[in-house]
Image (cartoon, rainbow, N blue to C red):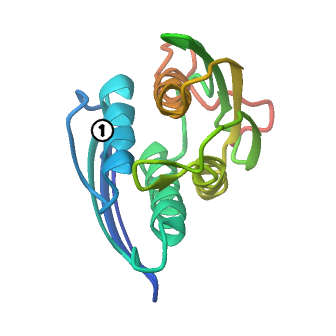
Amino acid sequence: MANRKASVSRKTGETDIKIELNIDGTGTATVDTGIGFLDHMLTSFARHGLFDLTVSVKGDLYVDSHHTIEDTGIALGMAIRKALGDKKGIKRYGSVMLPMDETLMLCAIDLSGRPYLVFDASFTVDQVGYFDTEMVKEFFYAISYAAGMNLHLKQISGSNNHHIIEAAFKAFAKALDEASSYDIRITDVMSTKGTI
């Protein structure tokens, strides 16, 4: 099978981001975004998806967290798309129902090449650490469009905002791990069209 690694550099007037991703990793991560809670979430994403991930972000945090979080999502989505290549042999679909204490999060993914996000989760505080909770949806929206994936995230239960966000990141990791995994019965791409 192909070596499914990608490096992405993305620089704008607001952020300077470098990401290295290995889809077939072991779950190791080195992450520095300037936002501690985002570092924690991306480290959890790598660990629970068994991806190797290096992220370095310099963003305009003197403004707020918006550009740093959204642009990191864009760059990570680009890395996922690049690492998956032509997607031959992968399952394409992945889903998980992930518990974290009182929280239960559903995530389902279709690596269809067609971007779409359905996000259904709610928060009772504006921030967790220096991470604006309204940016959770924006982060996953950015990933879905940059990666070209159909992504559904639904909070089934939960009251602790930290748990809800962390469960979303971990569920996303587990579903992506499943969707990107190989099935020896699939010799081309999982589509009647011949491409995804």
Name the residue at 48% across, 60% down: 69
| Mark 1 surroundings within 10 Å by alpha-carbon count, few (fewer than 14), some (14 through 19), many (20 or more) | many
Q: Is residue 1 visible?
A: no
Residue at the front extreme of this rendering: 125
Splitting the image into 4 quarters, where does residue 149 fall?
top right
Q: Is residue 2 left or right of residue 175?
A: left
The N terminus, quarter of image: top left
| Residue 158 location (% of width, % of height) | 62, 19
Between 68 and 126, the residue placed more toward the observer is 126
Please state which amino acid type lies under the numbered disc 1.
Thr
Name the residue at 58% across, 22% down: 91
Between 51 and 111, the residue placed more toward the observer is 51
Q: Is residue 37 visible?
A: yes
Name the residue at 48% across, 66% down: 65
Between 96 and 191, the residue placed more toward the observer is 96
Q: Tag 1, which secondary structure?
A: helix
Q: Is residue 178 left or right of residue 50?
A: right
Splitting the image into 4 quarters, where does residue 104 fall?
top right
| Residue 13 location (% of width, % of height) | 46, 89
Q: Is residue 162 left or right of residue 143?
A: left
Task: Establish if 114 lies above or below 61.
Answer: above
The C terminus, quarter of image: top right
From the image, tell me which residue sits under label 1: 43
Q: Is residue 150 left or right of residue 165?
A: right
Task: Establish if 113 lies above or below 71.
Answer: above
Name the residue at 39% across, 39% down: 41
Task: Establish if 109 lies above or below 126.
Answer: above
| Residue 74 location (% of width, % of height) | 53, 61
Residue at the bottom extreme of this rendering: 13
| Residue 21 location (% of width, % of height) | 32, 48
